[in-house]
Image (spheres, grey):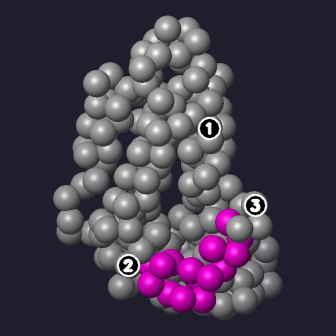
Amino acid sequence: MSPRGVATPDVRERLFSAAERVVERDGPGALTSRSVTTEAGCAKGLLHAHFAGFDEFVAELCLDRFARTAAKAEALPGLAGQGTVARNLDAVVLALFASGGPALSGLAMARPAAASRVRTALAGGAPGFTAIQESITGYLEAEQELGRVARTVDPRSVALAIVGTAHHLLLTSWPGTPDPRPAMTRLVAALVDG
């Protein structure tokens, strides 16, 4: 545990990673400010010193993870011609499901104040599902130019189907339910190879 008055490096990421471990191990119902700070091995008040409250913390955690996935998706068009199309798409889409993604998304949506913060941030331009969808569309168009995706494939519709399914699975999966990743992988393969 960090001594009182000593700076804790990269507090946000430390707390976010701790929250993901709590959710993965114990489920979303176990996520509290105390469980996060205990898991992070830091002072109990650290979370509230950096966030206005637990709802802000949950919203910021979701937005941070959406932004990471959006950044990964933004790199997709540069991968055109490399690896396989399905594997490149899987790497981005499955990142949404890493580290308790379904449970965290469900938790944010179950907390009205957190859900409102997420919606407001996304409406204000924070990267989220729309940015991921746009990147997937651009990537599929680039792969079509290289002849690796059939011209009969509609990149915008495929991107919408992938992102929409990921969104659905994020909000309807939780610890104890079947792992959504195999279904997502099958969908991606069917859409780009089918």
Regarding mark 1 in the picture, which secondary structure is present there?
helix
Question: Would residue 68 be visible to someone looking at this image?
Answer: no
Q: CA distance from mark 1 to mark 3?
A: 15 Å
Q: Amino acid at mark 3?
A: Gly
- Left or right: residue 187 versus residue 4 is left
Q: Which residue is mark 3?
A: 125
Residue at position x 54%, y 73% in the image? 40
Q: Which residue is mark 2?
A: 28
Residue farthest along the front direction in this orientation? 152
Residue at position x 50%, y 78% in the image? 108
Q: Main secondary structure of the magenta part?
A: helix
Task: Give the camera-side residue of 135 and 61.
Answer: 135
Count of marks, rendered view: 3
Q: Position of residue 57 (x, y in %)?
A: 62, 79
Q: Amino acid at mark 2?
A: Pro
Q: CA distance from mark 1 to mark 2?
A: 30 Å
Please report whichever mark, 1 or 3, sits nearer to the chain's N-terminal start: 3
Determine which of the numbered discs, if any, sits on residue 80 in the image. none
The answer to the question of whether label 1 and label 3 lie on touching residues, with beta carbons closer than 8 A, is no
Q: Which residues are magenta?
A: 107-122
Q: Which residue is mark 1?
A: 135
